[in-house]
Amino acid sequence: MPNCIRSKAFTEFALETMRDSMKLARPVYKKPASKTGSNMANRNTKFTGDADEDPWQFNDTDPTNDINTDGFRRALYQTTEDRFVQSLANVKNEGGVFTFKGENFGDNGQYFVDGYTTFYYGDETHPVAIQNKRTLKFMYNTEEFGDNVKVEEEKDADGITKFTVTGVTVDGADVSDKVSAFARYEDEQDIDGDYLGEVDIRFSDYFFSPKRTSIGVTWSQLSEITLDVGFGVSAEEYLIDYASQEIRVALDYRAFKLAYANARTNPAAYHVEFDAAYNTTNAVPGSNGTKEGYIENALTFNTAIEKLSDTMLNDINIGGVNTLICGPSAGTYLTLNPAYSAKGKMVTKGCHVYGSFDNSLVIKVPSSIIPTNEILTTFKNPEQENDVGVIFGTLVPFYSTGVIQRRNFYKEAGLSTYGDWNVLNKKYLGIIRILNLKDATSN
């Protein structure tokens, strides 16, 4: 009997109608970035000061808010920005000069708070200068930007604070005009709450329109008599049983093919290459080209999985790998690593559980589903079963027409299941491609 295992990698639930749906609620920032409202764009790390800047995707008009499209409005838990809830805001770099006035800092810069100013290049992992709260002097990142970095503070006649940044060098070029800066402002002045922002719950609808997956079987009266008398086998039970299994197997194949195709559309960072480094040509003793080196290299495969998990963390602030769906040779390669366990291994037939690898379920499939040297990784949130890459809904698990007797002494029956699927988050899907495998299959 074939294995049916798509629910181990994805989520399945029962549909109730022919036009069913599920809704995912995502908390998002609602405050618009516009000239008529308080512009929250200056609370974003990548703020540049452009008039039409919309880094929070406030003005996104896509009603689906689908995470699988570019420019979707990220949920609160999908971003690492922290200034939105703190009294910290950027100002525009004007040729290396930063004037802390306007918006949060007041028309005359009266709400600027000295001592919290930070200058950075690109993002805050590259600080240029950080202000000391006690001395109000600046500490410089000379190791990264050279010894000539300097920040000068001045106040004009109106008391407005200005900072001039010079000497910031990257690859021999002065990039002082590309530096960003943020500072603290006095939030007690915000009586109307203009700079608190707003959080809204945005629902994303995922509709299911169940379609039929079906198969028909036919047998003659003569074959029925022959099987019954000669072998004690019921032709009806025999054919209907195998027909039902064929449907279930087809659902598995379609599930893994669908997930793999979506994973291929992810950015390049979601496609990790791991070099098994087996090459007997010109192999140097002690190198990866030898069998001993090949095994030693396999011991580091865990890092490829963690790299993919870290890619998700960096991008959407959540994710991981808890299922490995392997092409034949890739699955076999995992057995060289002590993190692999054959516990729970099924009979080698179609899509089957192959064991586990460091607490992740391992499934092996034919190379026509996943290329022999590749692994499709999936994440299924253990805290929320619907937080998954792909979800499947079933309206009718199995329906049979019953046996129909024909006049020509033939019998037939039809079997079907009704269901549909939705890709909720393709970024929960990744691919690990293993290069230079030893004894990789070629068919």
Image (cartoon, rainbow, N blue to C red):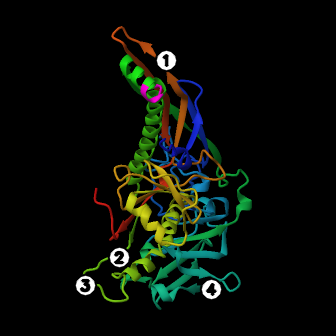
Q: Position of residue 351 (x, y in %)?
A: 45, 49
Check whether the beta carbons of the residues at disc 4 and disc 1 lie within 8 A of each other: no
Check whether the beta carbons of the residues at disc 4 and disc 3 lie within 8 A of each other: no
Residue, disc 4: 137
* Left or right: residue 240 compared with residue 134: left
Amino acid on which disc 1 is placed: Gly
**Quarter of the image where one finds residue 251:** top left
Q: Earlier in the sequence, mark 2 or mark 1?
A: 2
- Which stretch did the figure color magenta? 230-234
Element at label 4:
loop
- Prevailing secondary structure class for the magenta stretch in the rendered image: loop
Amino acid on which disc 3 is placed: Asn
Q: Please tell me how crowded label 4 is: few (under 14), some (14-19), or many (20+) other residues with Cα within 10 Å.
A: some
* Cα distance in 3D space between marks 4 and 1: 86 Å
Residue, disc 1: 402
Residue, disc 3: 282
